[in-house]
Image: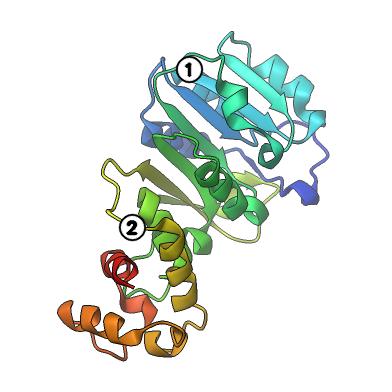
């Protein structure tokens, strides 16, 4: 492990388990002609293995890591930007790099996990696959299916864009300094076939409104909507009228959205 002044404000916990690194690389399934965006390379343990497989553009916010990363990773296919990923124009950063498919692989700081994923979606970055290490309980929400206690508006939002899979858990002992919680590797693969939806903004608002009070029924949460239309769709899909949002599959929410 490198000597470094670890900074809590950046959520720095460096991965130092070679077996975990190798498993992440194998989940990614990249080739030499692909480009990997790595967010927060830290000590460079994962970066060292990624660069053997593909081109790598790494974003690091901590300038004190520059000497270590540049001395450790010597390759013409390694690009290093010292800045906050959330402030970057990613399309501009990658426009002069030739590649086949774009991947995002990262051990994300827990406190900015959702903003980073949102940025990739909202900036319309054409990512084939993301392999992200996140806090275990957050990963459970991201990958949850209808009927699960972890199923929420963020589960539906992310599943609209990606096929999401829980790959494996990572013990807190695989990091230095050791965090207070375990992590999980989640893969997000771009959906080949998008859902047939009339209005995305209307759909996302419906989802948010449906979960505004999770323990309430859908009818109670959607009092401002024409519930007669919604009721017909619920009955058609063999769902009770007093159903909660957590028990409704994404396909039914899309049908509701397209009809209201």
**Image spot of residue 247 (x, y percent):** 32, 77
Image quarter for residue 65?
top right
Q: Residue at x 29, y 53 (%)?
A: 195
Q: Identify the residue under disc 2.
A: 198
Tell me the CA gap for discs 2 and 1: 43 Å
Relative to residue 118, is residue 145 depicted above or below?
below
Q: Is residue 246 above or below residue 27?
A: below
- Confirm whether residue 223 shows in the render: yes
Tell me the residue at 43%/90% (across/down).
220
The residue that disc 1 covers is: 52
63 relative position to 91: left or right:
right
Secondary structure type for disc 1: helix
Q: Which residue: 39% across, 19% down?
A: 100
> In the drawing, does residue 152 fall left or right of residue 114?
left
Residue 82 appears left or right of 184 = right
Quadrant in which residue 59 is drawn: top right
Q: Secondary structure at mark 2?
A: loop
From the viewer's perspective, is 90 left or right of 220?
A: right
Q: Residue at x 55, y 39 (%)?
A: 106
């Amino acid at each position: 492990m490198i000597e470094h002044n670890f900074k809590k404000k950046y959520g720095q916990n460096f991965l130092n388990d070679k077996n975990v690194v190798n498993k992440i690389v194998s989940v990614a399934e990249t080739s030499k002609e692909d480009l990997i965006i790595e967010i927060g390379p830290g000590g460079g343990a994962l970066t060292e293995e990624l660069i053997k497989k593909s081109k790598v553009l790494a974003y690091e916010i901590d300038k004190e890591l520059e000497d270590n990363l540049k001395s450790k990773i010597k390759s013409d296919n390694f690009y290093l930007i010292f800045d906050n990923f959330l402030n970057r124009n990613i399309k501009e950063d990658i426009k002069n790099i030739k590649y086949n498919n774009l991947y995002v692989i990262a051990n994300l700081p827990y406190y900015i996990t959702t903003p980073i994923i949102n940025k990739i979606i909202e900036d319309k970055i054409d990512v084939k696959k993301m392999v992200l290490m996140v806090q275990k309980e957050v990963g459970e929400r991201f990958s949850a299916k209808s009927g699960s206690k972890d199923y929420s508006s963020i589960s539906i939002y992310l599943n609209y864009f990606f096929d999401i899979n829980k790959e494996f858990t990572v013990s807190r002992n695989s990091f230095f300094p050791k965090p207070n919680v375990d992590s999980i590797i989640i893969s997000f693969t771009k959906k080949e076939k998008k859902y047939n939806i009339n209005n995305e903004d209307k759909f996302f608002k419906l989802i948010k409104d449906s979960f505004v009070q999770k323990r309430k029924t859908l009818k109670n949460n959607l009092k401002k909507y024409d519930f007669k239309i919604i009721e017909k769709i619920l009955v058609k899909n063999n769902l009770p009228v007093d159903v909660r949002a957590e028990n409704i599959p994404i396909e039914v929410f899309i049908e509701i959205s397209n009809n209201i």
